[in-house]
Amino acid sequence: MASGVIDLRSDTVTRPSPPMLAAMAAADTGDDVYGEDPTANALEQRVAAMLGHEAGLFTTTGSLANILGVRAWVAPGKELLCEAQAHIVRAELGAHAALNGVTTRTWFHPRGKVDLAAVRALVAPDAGPYLVSTAAIAVENTHNFAGGTVQALDELTSLRQAVHGTGVRLHLDGARLWNAQVATGVPAAEYASVFDSVSVCLSKGLGAPVGSVLVGPADMIAEARQWRKRLGGGWRQAGVLAAAGLYALDHHVDRLAEDHAHARMVAEVVNDAAPGVVDPASVETNIVLLNVGDRAERLVAEAREAGVLVGVVGPGIVRLITHLDVGAGESRKAAEVLGAVLSR
């Protein structure tokens, strides 16, 4: 990013640190399409073990991991249920419908949470010859467009119990699952144990330059590997990038607590300057949503002029995300800029 610019548009804007670049340069590699890249294999095995699943698959993006995970459980013409603000239905360009013939229905929760009553009202495992049958339910943890909210483990367990014996599968979009783990102290494996498949990102809070991992049963992952290739997502010497993911798992998980603290501080500073725009108590992880009404575009433009990058993610909603490339001092400066613009 340009010198002096504080980029809080997303935690995907981070750049590899010198030690991460060194790990990438030293990676042992091979052709991953042949299954011969030892570093990619090690990453897949490690993430699967961390999350308590049989096997893993390294993918370019979280969206591809979700596409492969949902495709495994939802046949063309069947439906996926998810929350109305979920990344799967808001920010993956309709891929599940366009590529795999998946239909979706949604419930709405203001904090992006699982609503068991709403899910029970929607789910229809065998809808007969005229309606669409439910094949799977997707949950996002943490929930991006709801402000980085964490799904409660007991609610997820109740969801699993609600679909037990119905044949309905559960997929976890865990792009920021590491943030949920750090925020709550609940191991990622406990969240993951509720689900049939899980996608996790390495290129968001963990700071790797690219990549996600999909985990699930070994036979499902084997088929997903073929579909990854079919969709043009086969790797060659993937170990260069997998090494960054391994480095991130070793060094960048626990430090997510710093991002969470910075996000809460930003919310507090902005709230002091412009009360009512954000409730600091609502900030659970590293995402802050500012409800600024018709001032959203002006806020983004004026903040940019002052060297702070944030983005509009919905009507009247400006989002900022803290990450490892923005420290406490820069976070406070950004908050002061946003507060100053909003208080004018």
Image (cartoon, rainbow, N blue to C red):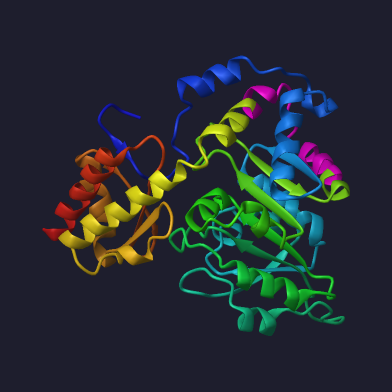
Q: Nearer the viewer, residue 337 or 84?
A: 337
Tell me: 186 left or right of 75: left
Report the predominant secondary structure element of the magenta stretch. Answer: helix
Quick one: quadrant of the C terminus? Answer: bottom left
Q: Extreme front residue here? A: 185
Rendered view: 280 above or below 330 = below
Q: Classify the position of the N terminus by image quarter.
A: top left
Image coords of residue 8 (percent x, y): 35, 44
**Residue 159 against residue 296 in the figure, above or below:** below
Q: Is residue 151 visible?
A: yes
Residue 281, quarter of picture: bottom left
Residue 167 in picture, x, y percent from top left? 84, 71
| x then y, percent, for residue 222 | 86, 43
Toward which corner of the image does residue 236 lie, by quadrant? top right
| Residue interval drawn in magenta | 222-242
* Between 247 and 254, the one nearer to me in the picture: 254
- Residue at x 54% of width, y 70% of height: 113
Question: Is residue 103 left or right of 304 when viewed as pictured?
Answer: right
Residue appearing at x 61%, y 32% in the figure: 245
Q: Quadrant of residue 14?
A: top left
